[in-house]
Image (tube, grey):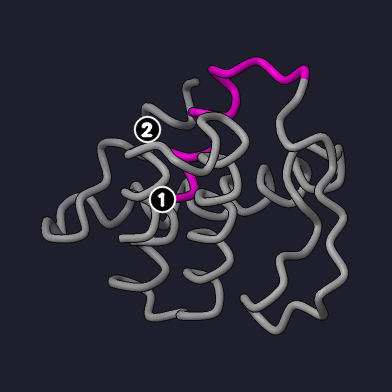
Amino acid sequence: AVLASKLLKFDDEKPATFFIGRRYSRHAAVLAAWARKWGVLPVARPGLAGGSGGVDAGRGGGGVNVGVLHNIVVMCQRAGFFFNDVSVQPREALHMHEAALDSAIARYGNDHRNVAACHG
């Protein structure tokens, strides 16, 4: 929750907040990687980022605290904005936005407005 609140202070239109993105975006990337390793998020998604079509969907968020999934959504979205708009690392941005989308689907299901918001 602390990491999510820190990343919420990052604003890609305010250079004074860029240090927040620099400091915390890598932490969000590590968290997303661990969430995939723990089975909270899918390991691969077909059609995105060169996915092979073989998907290990993990538990799809089953049994995971919904607050944790929400925090992953927030952190990965903010980190994605940082990587895309500030540090110009589109591959990292894509991975972060995919993790945010996967977390939102695990948290809310496919047909929810928060999932649509992750699509941009």
Q: Distance from label 2 to label 1 (Cα)?
A: 13 Å
Disc number for residue 6: 2
Left or right position of 73 against 66: left
Residue shown at 72%/72% (left/top)? 46
Quadrant of the frame with the C terminus: bottom left
* Neighbour tally class for label 2: few under 14, some 14-19, many 20 plus, Cα within 10 Å: some
Q: Where is residue 52 in the image (x, y as percent from the top left)?
A: 82, 80
Label 1, on which residue?
77
Q: Give the range drawn in magenta.
A: 63-78
In the picture, residue 51 is in which quadrant? bottom right
* Amino acid type of the residue that numbered disc 2 sits on in the rendered structure: Lys
Residue shown at 37%/27% (left/top)? 5
Does label 2 or label 1 sit earlier along the sequence? Answer: 2
Left or right position of 3 against 62: left
Name the chief secondary structure element in magenta. helix
Q: Where is residue 110 in the image (x, y as percent from the top left)?
A: 52, 43
Q: Is residue 66 magenta?
A: yes
Left or right position of 52 against 41: right
